[in-house]
Amino acid sequence: MAGHESFEPADRKRQVADPTATPRAAEEPRQSCDPAFRHGVVVGFDGSTSSERALSYAIGMAHRSGSGLIIVHVANRLPTTVWAGCEPPVFVDVPDHRTEVLGLELACADYLAEVPWILVERGGDICHELEEVGREYSADAIVVGSTHGIVGRIFGSVAGRLARRAQRPVVVIP
C-alpha cells in the first residue's frame, strides 16, 4: 500500500534485504563438470543406427582436432495429459534406464579408446538439451544422426530443428 506504514513490535526480528547485494538469477546456469572437455565435440546418442553413425563421425572429428567427446543421451519426457488427461499439460520425466545400458556398452567399446569421452544424461527436449550441453562445454560442433520415418516427417526431425536454432555448427550424418 502506498503511503501506509505498518509498524511491528520491536522484539520481532525481520530479515532485511541487503541493497548492495547483486541479485541472483532464479536459475543458475549449469557449469561443465570437467574443463578438460571444453571445446570438445557434442554428439547425440540413443543407440539407434543413425546415432551410431553420428558417434563414429564424432569420434573421428574429436580425434582429428585433439579434443574430447561429449556423448549426450536425452531421456524421455511425456506430457501428463498422456497419463492423467489433466489440464494444463505438464511434462514429467519418465524413468529411463537406457543411459546406464548405453554407458556400459560405450565403456566396453574398443573404438572409443582413441579419444577421451564422457557420457552426459539429460531429460527434456532433445534439441534444447543438446544445444545447452554444447553451450556449457563451449563445444566446437554438435553431431547428430538424421531422422528417418513418419515421426520425423510429422513432428520435424531433431537434426532439422537443431540446425535452425543452434548457435554453433551442427553436423547431420545421414
Image (spheres, rainbow, N blue to C red):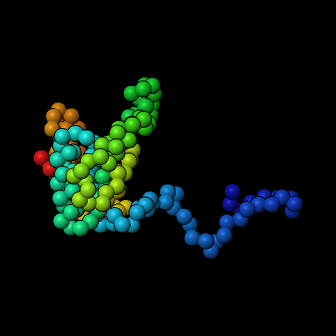
| Residue at image coords 18%, 61% | 61
Q: Nearer the viewer, residue 59 or 135?
A: 59
| Residue at image coords 34%, 39% | 101
Q: Nearer the viewer, residue 116 or 4?
A: 116
The number of discs equals 0
Residue farthest to the left, as pictured: 174
> Residue 140: x, y in percent?
25, 65
Left or right: 51, with 76 as reference point: left
Left or right: 169, with 128 as reference point: left
Quarter of the rendering occupied by the N terminus: bottom right
Q: Quadrant of residue 142?
A: bottom left
| Residue at image coords 41%, 29% | 81
> Residue 62: x, y in percent?
22, 62
Note whether 24 is above or below 172 in the view shown: below
| Residue at image coords 45%, 27% | 86
Residue farthest to the bottom, as pictured: 20
Q: Is residue 163 visible?
A: no
Q: Is residue 114 visible?
A: yes
Note whether 49 is above or below 24 in the view shown: above
> Residue 148: x, y in percent?
15, 38
